[in-house]
Amino acid sequence: MRRQAMKRRKNASGCRTGIYRGRKRLERVNRADNHNRGRKFIPGTSHTVGSAEQSQEMLAAGRGNTRPAVCQIIGYKNSGKTTLICELIRQLRKKGCTVAVIKHDGHNFDMDHEGTDTWKQRQAGASAVAITSDARTSVIQERTSSLPGLLEAFADYDYVLVEGFKQEQYPKIVLIRQAEDIALLGEASRIAAMALWGPMQASACLPQASGIGRFDISDSAGMANLLWQKRSYFQNFNI
């Protein structure tokens, strides 16, 4: 009998602890709701962006998935891809995220300069050169690289923004500046959002697809919030 009484007291204590914890959790939710009242909701989600401290907590919790969140920024020439990427970098950095960028170039670019040691080594026939310091590392290889291979090399970053590679299968933000650009929506896969220039906002030619966000081209904060709130979606691929 004494043992059963002790067991009942233990169970009751456990229930009280559970109720207490439940109340505390509800209080935290209510505080969060009060904090978020009147704030702008993220398009396509049911979340708002919290404080910098909350951002750090969410980012730390999400790092259990070690893959970076990848988003392709695609559009035709002069649609604003580089400008948008730079703004997204600034917005994501404000949330404490590390950001890497991969750009596809259709020309024979060269990031090295004539007369440098690495330039001389490449001219001598080196197939690859690397230079590193306390603050920076650069690698130049005389070959092309696949996007999956580059992503694997950037696996330690929180986000990787990709400019170009239209035919790849990663989530995308498609930039639409004029009516002719709408064709890109039919060519691209895994479209997460459209970034629309002013005149295109009211275009009747745009598809009414559910699940695809719509943003003004200048709304980099809104697009960064989409990347933040839907982080797991942008991580959902194999490298």
Image: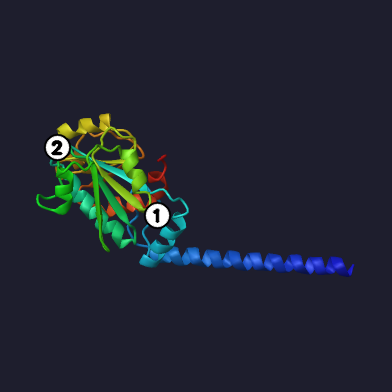
Crowding at dot 2, Cα within 10 Å, few <14 / some 14-19 / many 20+, comes out as: few
Report the residue marked by disc 1. 47
Q: In this view, does 157 lie to the left or right of 194?
A: right
Query: Is residue 62 something that shows in the picture?
Result: yes
Q: Callout 1, which amino acid? A: His
Q: Is residue 202 left or right of residue 192?
A: left
Comparing 58 with 203, the one in front is 58
In the rendering, at what x and y percent does residue 116 appear? 13, 53
Compute the Cα span from label 2 to label 1: 41 Å
Q: Residue at x 59, y 64 (%)?
A: 22
Q: In this view, does 15 lie to the left or right of 4?
A: left
**Quadrant in the picture for residue 73:** top left
Query: Is residue 171 something that shows in the picture?
Result: no
Looking at this rendering, what residue extends furthest in the left direction?
Answer: 114
In the rendering, at what x and y percent does residue 74 appear? 23, 40
Comparing 76 with 49, the one in front is 76
Report the residue marked by disc 2. 107
